[in-house]
Image (spheres, rainbow, N blue to C red):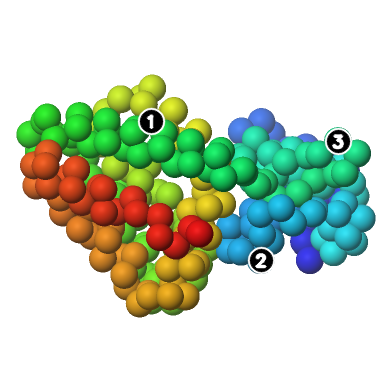
């Protein structure tokens, strides 16, 4: 159930609130975060219908905030609307998925090529190190949503280290479309292997990047990107 100080369908601002003050979370924000967590944790699966009547009753909100939350989730690539059939968790065809994964791999290889061409002291990896620590903690606790968020943050941080903003923006868009399947990959890996296996893969990739050796980075990235848990 979503709890908020904001009245249903109301505005974020309180009477007399001055510009620049922090606003409490809106019903839209709360509904969006709840649904995003359910999608990325696997509670809601690709292709599953999102019935407005059921969701408004469960969250105790009106259709207005819910529809806006669904629209924002659509911009994140997590929800899609079908003509006369309402909304559902996004699903891709096998071809769509293969093409997106190929583009993601090409962008990562290009980013890490840029990194390997520079001195190791010239690129910033603290973001990747923080994400890796979060991934270790999530694996220890068995928190799949936190693991998915950390996994996404790790890869974004590696690409960001290349220092190419247009590359990062393009990569982030591809990653947004793939995050559903990346979450599924992490869940299946956790179900079929040691919880630490995914952590170790990311540790090896980070160590390869730190080394600055192009062949080592390429080799580790090739093994890292194996999709044996997707199908």
Q: Mark 2: give few (<14), some (14-19) or many (20+) Cα within 10 Å.
A: few
Where is residue 81 shown, x and y percent of the image? 78, 39
Pointer 2 residue: 43
Residue at the image point whose x is 79% and y is 66% from the top: 1
User: In terms of secondary structure, where does tag 3 sit?
Assistant: loop
| 22 in relation to 206, above or below | above
Precedes in sequence: disc 3 or disc 1 = 3
- The number of discs equals 3
| Residue denoted by label 1 | 168
Residue 11 image-quadrant placement: top right
Which one is in front, 41 or 26?
Answer: 41
Query: Element at badge 2?
Result: loop
Farthest top residue in view? 166
Q: Where is residue 89 drawn, in percent x and y?
A: 70, 50
Decide: few, some or many residues near mark 3? Use Cα within 10 Å; few <14, some 14-19, many ≥20: few
Q: Are marks 2 and 3 in contact (CB under 8 Å)?
A: no
Asked whether, in this view, residue 207 is left or right of residue 162, the answer is: left
Q: Nearer the viewer, mark 2 or mark 3?
A: 3
Q: Earlier in the sequence, mark 2 or mark 3?
A: 2
Q: Is 74 located above or below residue 167 in the figure?
A: below
Front disc: 3 or 1? 3
The residue depicted at 26 percent of the width and 54 percent of the height is: 223
- The residues bearing labels 2 and 1 have C-alpha atoms spaced at a distance of 30 Å
| Quadrant in the rendering for residue 19 | top right
Local crowd at mark 1 within 10 Å, few (<14), some, or many (≥20)?
Answer: many
Residue that badge 3 annotates? 83
Looking at the image, do the residues carrying marks 3 and 1 touch, with CB atoms under 8 Å apart? Answer: no
Question: Which disc is residue 223 wearing?
Answer: none
- Residue in the image at 43% along x and 75% along y: 192
For the residues marked 3 and 1, what is the alpha-carbon distance in whole angstroms? Answer: 33 Å
Residue 129 visible in rendering: no
Quick check: 230 above or below 192? Answer: above
């Amino acid at each position: 159930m979503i709890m908020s100080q904001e009245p249903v369908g109301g505005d974020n601002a309180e009477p007399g609130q001055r510009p620049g003050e922090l606003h409490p979370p809106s019903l839209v924000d709360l509904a969006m975060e709840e649904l995003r967590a359910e999608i990325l944790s696997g509670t809601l699966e690709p292709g599953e219908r999102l019935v407005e009547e059921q969701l408004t009753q469960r969250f105790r909100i009106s259709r207005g905030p819910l529809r806006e939350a669904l629209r924002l989730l659509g911009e994140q690539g997590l929800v899609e609307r079908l003509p006369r059939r309402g909304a559902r968790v996004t699903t891709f065809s096998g071809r769509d998925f293969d093409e997106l994964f190929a583009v993601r791999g090409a962008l990562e290889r290009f980013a890490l090529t840029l990194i390997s061409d520079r001195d190791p002291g010239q690129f910033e990896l603290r973001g990747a190190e923080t994400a890796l620590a979060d991934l270790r903690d999530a694996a220890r606790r068995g928190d799949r949503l936190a693991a998915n968020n950390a996994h996404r943050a790790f890869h974004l941080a590696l690409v960001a280290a290349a220092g190419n903003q247009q590359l990062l923006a393009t990569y982030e868009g591809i990653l947004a479309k793939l995050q559903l399947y990346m979450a599924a990959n992490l869940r299946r890996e956790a179900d079929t292997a040691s919880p630490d296996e995914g952590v170790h893969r990311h540790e090896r990739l980070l160590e390869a990047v730190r080394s600055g050796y192009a062949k080592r980075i390429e080799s580790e990235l090739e093994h890292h990107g194996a999709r044996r848990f997707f199908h």
